[in-house]
Amino acid sequence: MTALSFMTRLGFARLYSNEEIAATMRQFYAVGLTVGILVTLPFALGAFSRHPWIQAWLWVFLSIWITRALHWDGWADIWDGWGSCAQGERFWQIVKDSNVGAFGAIAMVIGILGQTLLAHELFQLGHWQVLIFAPIAGRVAAVTIGGLGEAPEASRQGRLFLQGATNSTILVQTLLAAITGILLCGILPTLYTTLLCICMLWSYLRVAKVQGGINGDFLGATVIGGELIAMLAYFI
């Protein structure tokens, strides 16, 4: 419930201890599975079955609504910071700025348009089960980068999450994601998802090394990137 309340609209809002927040990293797979099922189930049951474009648009809308656009915020922020070519304190000022810059706007267009196009293709083929796996892949990738990165000194909330990304947490959730991916998508799409996620994590960690660590925005950007990768990998 702590993980759901922070990452979605499904939990109950209240104050949580540092230990509880850190422990939510063990539930990222479960949150991804819950989100994937809830936003995909209406269409799996036949809603708008003759209109895959409408299904795709509603799938993206529901995924944004149920998560309060939490991860999209990080996706736009990291793109703004990366696109600015700034380093150090200036980079973090841009990332934490509530205003969206040109690169953040471009990222939102690429991300939302990409998810809509990919979801349309999946609905048109009748392979909606991939859309259950995509939120899982994104959140497990976020757990992984949390365990591989270090939080900057100024990051408080991000540091709490990273503390929960232990080696055992990463291992268990990666295995669960791999099994789920094979069952829902097949071996090759799961393999391609893994390889592309490794490339994404390597890219983010390169930026983090230059900038002195990762924060919650990096985790959010990883979630969105992982979702896009899982959907795209199915077509490879």
Image (cartoon, grey):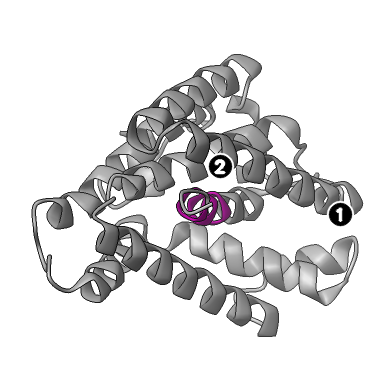
Q: Where is residue 224 in the image (x, y as percent from the top left)?
A: 52, 56
Residue 135 place in picture, x, y as percent: 41, 46
Name above or below for residue 228 compared with residue 3.
Answer: below
Element under disc 2: helix
Q: Looking at the image, can residue 123 be seen? A: yes
The residue that appears at 45% across and 29% down in the rendered structure is 177
The reply, left or right, for residue 38 in relation to residue 131 is: left
Q: In this view, does 130 lie to the left or right of 140?
A: left
Write the residue at 72% across / 46% down: 199
**Which residue is pictured at 33% across the width and 58% down the height?**
122
- Residue annotated with mark 2: 193
Q: Residues within 10 Å of mark 1 (few under 14, many from 20)?
A: some
Which element is circle 1 on? helix
| Residue 205 falls left or right of residue 102 | right
User: What's under tag 1, amino acid-wise?
Assistant: Gln
Residue 147 sits inside the magenta stretch: no
Q: In which quarter of the image is residue 83?
A: bottom right
| Extreme residue toward the left, this view | 46
Q: Where is residue 123 drawn, in percent x and y?
A: 26, 61
Which amino acid, by three-letter code, is at mark 2?
Thr
Residue 211 is left or right of residue 61, and the answer is right
Most extreme residue toward the bottom, as rendered?
102
- Magenta stretch in the rendered image: 223-232
The quarter holding residue 115 reads: bottom left
Residue indicated by mark 1: 211
In the rendered image, the vertical position of residue 107 relative to residue 227, given as above or below? below
Image quarter (top left, top right, bottom left or bottom right) of the N terminus: top left
Q: Of the residues under marks 2 and 1, which one precedes in the sequence?
A: 2
